[in-house]
Image (cartoon, rainbow, N blue to C red):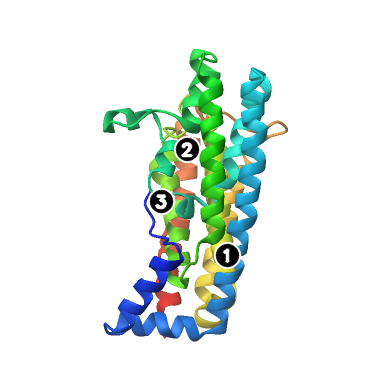
Amino acid sequence: MRTSLVPAALGAALVLATAACGSSGDDRAVQALDPRTTAAVEQYEGFVSEQADQLLERTTTFVTAVKAREVEAAKAAYPLARGPWERIEPVAESFGDLDPRIDGREDVVEDGQEFTGFHRLEKDLWVDGLQPDSAAVADRLLADVVEIVARAKAVELAPDQLAGGAKGLLDEVATGKITGEEDRYSHTDLYDFDENVKGSKAVVDALRPVLQERDPQLLTEVDARFAALDAELEKHRTDKGFALYTSLSKDEVKELSVALDALSEPIARVSGVVAAK
């Protein structure tokens, strides 16, 4: 997924440029003057900062286990370390080559890139066994996470970018998690699925006062669809976490897909409400 969430300087330049070019710029100017949208952006940027801190903390735990060659501990830490990343994925993915280095799947090799990061270590842990360079891969992952955390904490967003991110996270589920392609070695896709949904919900929570004022019926529908999707996900949660994705039947995957599609439709309308004057 490549949701456009630009850093501060570029974001400011884009807002200034569009402000001189008709209705799109006018809409952004109105957004900037609305205290509800300003508060929404501030709340979500705070959420991003908190998740960035968790990403660093959990990745450190994961990397420590990998380097100590504590395979079971590393396996347990893997889906938890990825959680904060998945919640703020549109922001994290906006920083160029850091995204494929941290979260690139083995397919990136076809594009001439090195297979590294979370999914390389996932393959080492579940398929190939820890390799002589696994510790070095883990060190690089942590260094890349440190860099992306610093960038994420400095990002400045516009209200319409928040709304687009909410939809983008659900699109990420539809194209990666619901297919079982994301965590193809560990089959922990439901963890990522759940975290993407939580990330989308965090955007809606930040925009809640805006939506309540401008389209309360849409907000009610969105909340109901989130609840329905959460209920489907909870069917696959055990006392040890989520079930492996490979344990789901075709009918169970279809039920998740239907609930996801039902949520994506009203979420797609949020951007229009936020952009409205």
Please name which of the two marks, 3 or 1, marks the residue nearer to the observer: 1
Amino acid type indicated by mark 1: Tyr
Q: Residue at x 43, y 49 (%)?
A: 93
Q: What secondary structure is marked by label 2? A: helix
Sequence-first disc among 3 and 1: 1
Name the residue rendered at 40%, 51% in the picture: 171
Helix, strand or loop for disc 1: helix
Among the 4 quarters of the image, the one containing residue 240: top right
- The Cα atoms of the two marked residues, 2 and 3, are separated by 20 Å
Q: Earlier in the sequence, mark 2 or mark 3?
A: 2
Q: Let me know if residue 18 appears in the view.
A: yes
User: Does residue 73 lie above or below 99 as drawn?
Assistant: above
For residue 269, say whether it is visible.
Answer: no
Horizontally, residue 201 falls left or right of residue 120, namely right
Number of residues whose C-alpha sits closer than 10 Å to that of mark 3, classed few (under 14), some (14–19) or many (20 or more): some
Figure check: 35 above or below 181: below
Label placed on residue 171:
3
Q: Name the amino acid type tagged 2.
A: Ile
**As displayed, is residue 222 above or below residue 34?**
above
Of the residues tagged 2 and 1, which is closer to the observer?
2
Disc 2 crowd, CA 10 A, few/some/many (<14, 14-19, 20+): many
Which residue carries the number 2 mark? Answer: 102
Residue 190 placed where, x, y %?
55, 38
Categorize mark 1 by other alpha carbons within 10 Å: few (<14), some (14-19), many (20+).
Answer: many
Q: Position of residue 206 (x, y in %)?
A: 58, 68
Per the image, the residue denoted by label 1 is 44
